[in-house]
Image (cartoon, rainbow, N blue to C red):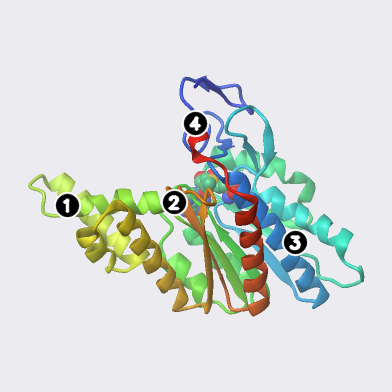
Amino acid sequence: MPWECAECGHSCDDHPKGFCTKCGLVQMGPGTHEKYEILEKYCCALSLIMRNNKKKHFFIDACAGSGIVQQYDGTTILDGSPRIFAKTREKVEETIRDKSKKPEVECKFIENNTKTYNILQRELQDYNSFCECIGGDCNFILDKILNEAEGAFTFIYIDPFGLGEPTIKYETVQKVLERGFTELFIHFSWQGVSRTAGLLNNIDHHDEKIRKTARSSVNSLDSYLSPQWQEIQRNAKSKYDRRKRFVTLYENNLKQYYPGVKYVEIPIGSNNPHYYLFFTTRNETGYKIMDGIIKNMRLKGSTSIDQY
Ligand SMILES: C[S@@+](CC[C@H](N)C(=O)[O-])C[C@H]1O[C@@H](n2cnc3c(N)ncnc32)[C@H](O)[C@@H]1O
């Protein structure tokens, strides 16, 4: 189906994966609107609780994108996660009974792609007083932001395409997991894992270049998922069994750090999800709120993946 970019007018025969190669505008995929609904509902509830308890709190979007996104089957522009986070402030201000209760949320957005970053900065300029956009690789920047937010509550959202570009390192996620007073909402790319895991067959390949690439990919997956993924890759009974066991492995890794781990497939209800979103918390109320949001969305029904 022909596609045209709503930002720069660039067009091509096929819908681009991820973003417009000319200007960097992020494109919506299957189930993106469900992800946004979860974020919006959870973050409004979270910030309201934080303000009522007078706690300094930050929303950190480590793979922020362009701030706005283009709808899959048209040229409509919608708010992406950074603008959803930023708008939480005014929504909580409207809802909170005692408006003298502060502090209000502050936001940090990290984006590595320069073109995408330029749109992000433009789209967040009205929120400059409490939102900061930082260009670069979150593997280096996130740690610095977390140090600056010492003592404050942080809700960290990590939503790259696939495994990230550059790949989100395990050490980056581990620093988040080890931090107190933090919640994590993270994209688990089943498809990215599956593609990389397939390279296990090439670790003894006679061609040195292929062998080296395969070994380096196996090493990154070892640290992303723990080396147990190799046994699953070799012995799973079917594609479905493999996916289920990879997801369980990821869940168990997170449970070593957080008692509350909840995940949902995207699109919700799909038998063949594109990815999973994992939420982790040490707070019972936080867990119940997220659980309720996901249950309600399941009841409403899911998007049919066939339309994509
Ligand atoms: C799926 S898009 C983001 C969408 C956005 N979070 C949203 O929900 O609207 C992923 C973005 O992450 C960026 N990205 C990927 N890996 C990154 C990294 N290591 N550091 C910073 N940004 C990264 C990509 O350039 C891309 O713009």
**Nearer the observer, 260 or 214:** 260
| Of callouts 3 and 1, the N-terminal one | 3
Is ligand 1 within 8 Å of the beta carbon of the residue shown at mark 2?
yes
Residue tagged 4: 21
- Disc count in the image? 4
CB contact under 8 Å: marks 3 and 1 = no
**Nearer the observer, 122 or 240:** 240
Q: Tag 1's secondary structure?
A: helix
CB contact under 8 Å: marks 3 and 2 = no
**Nearer the observer, 238 or 192:** 238
Query: Is 254 positioned to the left or the right of 198 in the image?
Result: right
Residue tagged 3: 44
| Spatial CA span between label 3 and label 4 | 33 Å
> Identity of the amino acid at label 4?
Thr
Q: Which mark is residue 164?
A: 2
| Of callouts 3 and 4, the N-terminal one | 4
| Spatial CA span between label 3 and label 1 | 46 Å
Above or below — where is 172 with respect to 61?
below
> Label 3: how many residues lie within 10 Å, few (<14), some (14-19) or many (20+)?
many
Which percent across, then down, holds residue 261? 52, 71
| Spatial CA span between label 1 and label 2 | 23 Å
> Label 1: how many residues lie within 10 Å, few (<14), some (14-19) or many (20+)?
few
| Spatial CA span between label 4 and label 1 | 32 Å
Q: Which mark is residue 201?
A: 1
Which percent across, then down, holds residue 128? 76, 51
